[in-house]
Amino acid sequence: MTVIHEHFDLTVPPLDRSPTQAEIQAGIRESQAVICTLNERFDGDMLAAAPSLRVIANYAVGYNNIDVDAAKARGVIVTNTPDVLTNATADITWALILAVARRVVEGDQLVRQNQWTGWSPTQMLGVDLSGKTLGIIGMGRIGLAVARRAAGFEMTVLYWTRSGRPLQPANPAWQRVSFEELLRRSDFLSPHIPLTPDTHHLLNDAALRLMKPTAFLINAARGPVVDEAALVQALQEHRLAGAGLDVYEKEPELHPGLRELSQVVLLPHLGSATIETRIRMGMMCVENVLAVLEGKPVPNRVA
Ligand code: GLV
Ligand code: GLV
């Protein structure tokens, strides 16, 4: 906040909730720069309400909340916050993998609800990670960071990317496979791709039906990459062992039935939610805004 006040007049004080579209439109009428979160939709109408706008700095790496073509058409630059949240998001992915494999949340609830009667050889058995196969969809910054962490758990890493481009950096321990083989072989499957029209419902009913009934689906990318209705049905019918989700199709709503499934761990979109990361994301937004307004090269321009 101090940094912002050094450089700008803030027209509307930030709220600790998402502003409504109308509040935003009223607030940005004279703005040259906007810092927004993934809750705010910047479509053609919103852009039309801000004729002086020169930059939208998205406080996230994924920018599916912004109509990039409409921004381009108006000469508005769009920036995001890559890199600084890579490790935090990879960590939350692993938190979900461990939580579903070892039933961490169910165990906590048992103890907390005073229903634990003591150690028993068959109580709350989970599955090993070592020797299992982790399947990663998309090997961008976050996918790579998730893959690197798999070495410590002695897991096999398979991956599929849409572009098929060679990995930077390449790792001989990781094997590129087809999308179908990835679905068939993964014990834990985790997408790390942006949400675009091409990736919407990439993990649909047909895809989920190729997965093993012992497999777990993890999602810390964007909710609509997974067909949530198809996922709930697959879990209810035990065609999948479980799921660890940080994101949903219609946040903060959940598809009916999801909440009732004990083999599912549900987080409230915490991927980048560490103090260090959120501070860096904020500073990055300010740097991008300043660069645009001062006519300098823009560090994290996506459009
Ligand atoms: C968070 O979800 C992000 O895209 O940064
Ligand atoms: C995000 O930073 C990604 O490229 O995965």
Image (cartoon, rainbow, N blue to C red):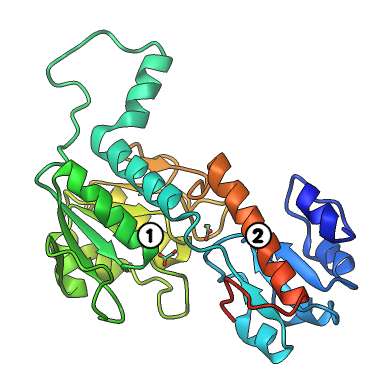
Crowding around mark 2 (Cα neighbors within 10 Å: few <14, some 14 to 19, many 20+) is: some
In the displayed orientation, state which residue is furthest to the bottom: 73
The percent position of residue 3, horizontal first and vertical second, equals: 77, 52
Looking at the rendered structure, the secondary structure element under dot 1 is: helix
Residue 233 appears in view: no
The residue carrying mark 1 is 142
Say whether residue 205 is left or right of residue 286: left
**Foreground of the two, 56 or 64:** 56
Looking at the rendering, in which quadrant would you find the C terminus?
Answer: bottom right
Identify the amino acid type marked 2.
Answer: Thr
* Observer-nearest of 33 and 232: 33
- Image quadrant assignment for residue 206: bottom left
Could you tell me how far apart the alpha carbons at marks 1 and 2 are, in whole angstroms? 19 Å
The percent coordinates of residue 16 (x first, y second) are 75, 44
What percent of the width, then of the height, locates residue 185?
13, 61
> If you read the primary sequence from the N terminus, does the residue marked by circle 1 or circle 2 appear first?
2
Query: Which residue is at a point 31% across and 54% down the rendered structure image?
Result: 146
Q: Which residue is mark 2?
A: 37
Q: In which quarter of the view is residue 56 placed?
A: bottom right
Q: Give the residue at x 70% y 61%.
A: 286
Between residues 39 and 237, which one lies in front from this camera angle? 39
Q: Is residue 34 left or right of residue 39?
A: right
Q: Is mark 1 within 8 Å of ligand 2?
A: yes
Callout 1 amino acid: Ile
Disc 2 CB within 8 Å of nearest ligand 1 atom: no
Q: Is residue 293 left or right of residue 122?
A: right
Q: Is residue 12 left or right of residue 282?
A: right
Q: Looking at the image, which residue sits at the far left?
A: 131
